[in-house]
């Protein structure tokens, strides 16, 4: 495993170790599909998700796919489309060991990519489609992945409260006799390393009955190149080391010119070449390639600034 080291950033020497089975890919569809092969060429990545329930064909047989139920269906009481899609994947011989729940359900401002699902609806869908996957196929369930802002933490607590209400009103149906079943908690973070470590500590101490955490989105959003590289260097090593970290996936699998978290966080330059962060994440030699942004990418980043500010505020409470 390689970690970025620059004399002005971090005094520690370059570290190399065995490949990390934790490290995966947040795959974001783009207008440059020729970049897709980068993530499976001389790469130590072992798994990926793409915010959907259907695998990305370029990764078939190369990376383990983790389906996601991104948002709530229009008819949550009767819709079984996610369950049926995953069931078909399993029946076709795909290795589906994990699924992810709702993507940032507390994000309702329209600019952050959140699915904007109420806790009550999420609990209903969880009982309807997610828990049967665990019961029928032994698939492990990742809780809804809320934002790193304070309202995300509140939303997740409300979700489990709604699950308890469903359990209390159960008519002894086998899928509704307990609060919602969850095997791991996914976390998102856009800020500095200290904030990330504090956030994970709070999640860990709140949900001691859940043994594993995944970090499924993280980056030093809007940071300088030096700060972004330092964040990556420190964070990759930290997540590999802590025992309760099941898996993690860095948010940066796109070109710097289209990055909505700042160009310096991207793992590809505007020309589709690996940056140092990208090379280190794939366990390759550093490239020295400097990412450059665009006016549009700076504008897109502005949508994340409120989330980052709120998250940093929460980390110091």
Image (spheres, rainbow, N blue to C red):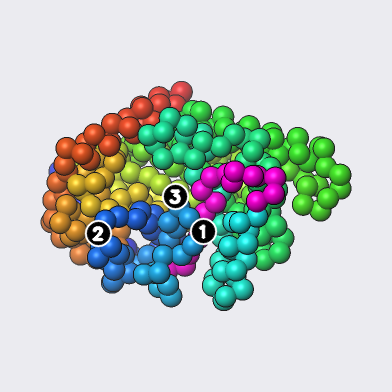
Which residue lies under the disc numbered 2? 32
| Kind of element beneath mark 3 | strand
Residue 67 part of the magenta segment = yes
The earlier-in-sequence mark between 3 and 2 is: 2
Q: Residue 149: in sight, yes or no?
A: yes
Residue 44 in percent (x, y) is at 35, 67
Where does the image place residue 128, in percent across and percent down from the top left?
Answer: 70, 50
The part of the chain drawn in magenta is 63-79
Above or below, 167 against 63 in this view is above
Confirm whether the magenta stretch covers residue 312: no
Looking at this view, is 131 or 129 the one in front? 129
Q: What residue is shown with label 1?
A: 53
Q: Is residue 290 left or right of residue 139?
A: left
Bin the neighbour count of mark 3 within 10 Å (Cα to Cα): few under 14, some 14-19, many 20 and up: many
Q: Give the image location of residue 306, x and y in percent.
A: 36, 27
Contact (CB < 8 A) between labels 1 and 3? Answer: no
Identity of the residue drawn at 26% across and 56% down: 31
Identify the residue shown where x is 59% and y is 63%: 86
Point out the residue furthest to the right here: 172
Q: Is residue 213 visible?
A: no
Task: Name the element at disc 1.
Answer: loop
Q: Is residue 87 above or below residue 178?
A: below
Nearest to the observer: residue 292 or residue 226: 292
Question: Which mark is first along the chain, 1 or 2?
Answer: 2
């Amino acid at each position: 495993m390689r970690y970025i080291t620059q004399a002005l950033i971090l005094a520690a020497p370059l570290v190399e170790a065995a490949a990390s089975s934790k490290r995966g890919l947040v795959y974001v569809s783009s207008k440059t599909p020729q970049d897709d092969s980068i993530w499976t060429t001389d790469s130590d990545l072992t798994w990926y998700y793409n915010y959907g329930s259907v695998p990305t064909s370029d990764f078939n047989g190369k990376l383990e796919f983790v389906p996601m139920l991104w948002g709530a269906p229009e008819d949550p009481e009767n819709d079984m489309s996610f369950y049926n899609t995953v069931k078909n994947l399993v029946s076709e011989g795909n290795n589906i060991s994990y699924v992810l729940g709702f993507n940032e359900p507390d994000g309702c401002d329209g600019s952050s990519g959140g699915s904007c699902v109420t806790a009550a609806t999420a609990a209903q869908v969880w009982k309807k489609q997610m828990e049967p996957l665990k019961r029928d196929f032994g698939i492990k369930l990742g809780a809804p992945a809320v934002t790193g802002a304070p309202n995300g933490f509140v939303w997740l607590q409300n979700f489990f409260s709604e699950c308890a209400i469903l359990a209390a009103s159960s008519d002894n149906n086998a899928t509704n006799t307990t609060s919602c079943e969850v095997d791991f908690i996914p976390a998102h973070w856009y800020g500095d390393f200290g904030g990330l470590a504090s956030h994970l500590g709070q999640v860990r101490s709140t949900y001691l009955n859940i043994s594993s955490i995944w970090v499924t989105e993280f980056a030093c959003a809007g940071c300088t190149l030096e700060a972004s590289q330092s964040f990556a260097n420190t964070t990759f090593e930290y997540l590999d080391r802590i025992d309760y970290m099941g898996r993690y996936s860095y948010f940066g699998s796109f070109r710097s010119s289209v990055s909505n978290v700042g160009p310096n966080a991207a793992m590809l330059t505007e020309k589709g070449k690996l940056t140092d962060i990208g090379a280190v994440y794939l366990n390759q030699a550093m490239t020295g390639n400097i990412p450059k942004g665009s006016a549009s990418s700076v504008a897109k980043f502005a949508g994340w600034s409120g989330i980052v500010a709120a998250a940093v505020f929460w980390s110091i409470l």
